[in-house]
Amino acid sequence: MTEATNAAAKKQRPGKPAGAQPGTLVDAEIDELPAPEPTRLGSRRQLAYLGLCLVLIGLNLRTVFSSFSAVLPEVSSQAALPGWAVVVLTTVPVTLLGVFAPLAPVLARRFGAERVLLGAMAVLTAGLLLRPAGISLPGAETGGAAGQAAGHLPALLAGTAACGAAIALCNVLLPGLVKRDFPHRLGLMGGLYTTAICASAALGAGFTYPVYAATGEWTLALWFWALPAAVVLFLFLPVAVRQPRIKHQAVRDGVNVWRSPVAWQVTIFMVLQAMMSFSVFAWLAPILRERGVGGATAGLIVSASIVLQMLGSLFAPALAARFRDQRAINAVVALMTGSGFALSIFGPLDLVWVWAGLLGLGQGSLTAVALTMIMLRTRDGHTAAHLSGMMQGVGYGLGSTGTLMVGQLHQVTGSFTAAGVLFLVVGLLAAVFGYHAGRNRYVG
């Protein structure tokens, strides 16, 4: 990296960086000694190349969720998946986001954040390749329903689990790299990074079914998403391998967030928003298709809803930071999300675009303000990093129960109506905990 960029990076202090969206760029490695340095590069052109790689990594972090749901009816019928397998396949990747999140800083201390990111992209690519693969097992060659399920289910489970673990590592480490390497462009890079993640979900929802319609094979529709992941893997390879390996030690600093009532209120707020957010990725397309919407149109509606999430995520953090407390905005966006999801399930179908739009604006704003609480409820970067780790571990781990409950309610009742009631309740609870988390208090 150039001397000017290194100097700018060293001047960057933890806390509330000007120009960045609060809470979206928390450095998970802030407790390490020696302090992690910016990625070593030789020129501004290489710095721009690194920025492109980081944004492209973000562009691959949600296609796993939305692409599977876009062709879920086809996968379920053609691969003859049992009901429990569908529930597991929509729940496991979200659960693993919480399980593997704490391992990211540990691996980064030993191998370096860049190498861990490279390894995560390799695992993600492998998982996307494995997920649709058919594995020859006893009974699979019979051609019956049981044989088809036996042939595809192991690969679907293993590939989905690998993708969830890889995305967990990227979720934790990528914001810190963006923050360290682009201290002079935090607003720009923070916006590009967060927009890329939302765009990845929209792309997966919007393009998977058309690929299926063009090829007639759900396996090809899912394999398609391994291509952009593999491209990013090879683009990022020369940057990551040239970084020196420096072992770091973890030095505990900041307050104990696990004993803070404020931290728990913020974390439960995160849990409830994650329950709704990942249920949108996993179930909104199947919900619309069960209501009679065509596969391509359902994918387009979900994609448009996610695009509106981008608008919410861009404006909500700045709006929240303007107020002394965030009680009102937290409660409003939580109610918007819960009601938008419920109306998408049992509201008039003629207004489904309106319900999806309400859901998208609410969900994008809700996710953004939940993350914004990390910075607004802490006084220093160390405490912010600990609160972020707590929110990701607990938030994603328990947030996966949303997709689990939707699947089980559908199995028991045969419809998604009960799930609509569930999300009215979840939205109301999110409003209550968001109201408490929004009070002008600090962790510790």
Image (cartoon, rainbow, N blue to C red):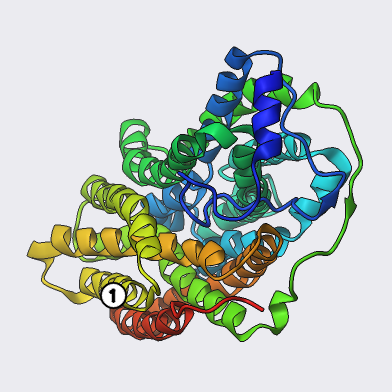
Toward which corner of the image does residue 94 lie, by quadrant? bottom right
Can the viewer see residue 130 in this picture? no
Please give the name of the residue rendered at 56% of the width and 28% of the height, measured from the top-left corner: 51
Can the viewer see residue 91 in this picture? yes
Q: Is residue 39 above or below residue 155?
A: above
Q: Is residue 350 left or right of residue 271?
A: left
Q: Which residue is mark 1?
A: 332
Question: How far across and how far down the image is residue 66, in percent?
Answer: 42, 51
**Quadrant where the N terminus is found in the figure:** top right
Q: Is residue 395 above or below residue 67?
A: below
Please give the name of the residue rendered at 46% of the width and 63% of the height, measured from the top-left corner: 278
Closer-to-camera residue (94/431) = 431
Question: How far across and how far down the image is residue 344, in percent?
Answer: 23, 68
Closer-to-camera residue (275/53) = 53
Toward which corner of the image does residue 16 lie, by quadrant? bottom right
Q: Quick one: label 1, few (<14), some, or many (20+) residues within 10 Å?
A: some
Q: Is residue 304 left or right of residue 215?
A: left
Please give the name of the residue rendered at 62% of the width and 21% of the height, measured from the top-left corner: 235
User: Looking at the image, which residue sits at the far left?
Assistant: 350
Closer-to-camera residue (36/297) = 36
Residue type at mark 1 is: Val
Please give the name of the residue rendered at 27% of the width and 59% of the height, measured from the top-left corner: 361
Toward which corner of the image does residue 216 lie, by quadrant? top left
Closer-to-camera residue (89/314) = 314
Q: Secondary structure at mark 1?
A: helix
Question: How far across and how far down the image is residue 282, in percent?
Answer: 43, 60
Q: Is residue 45 above or below residue 383?
A: above
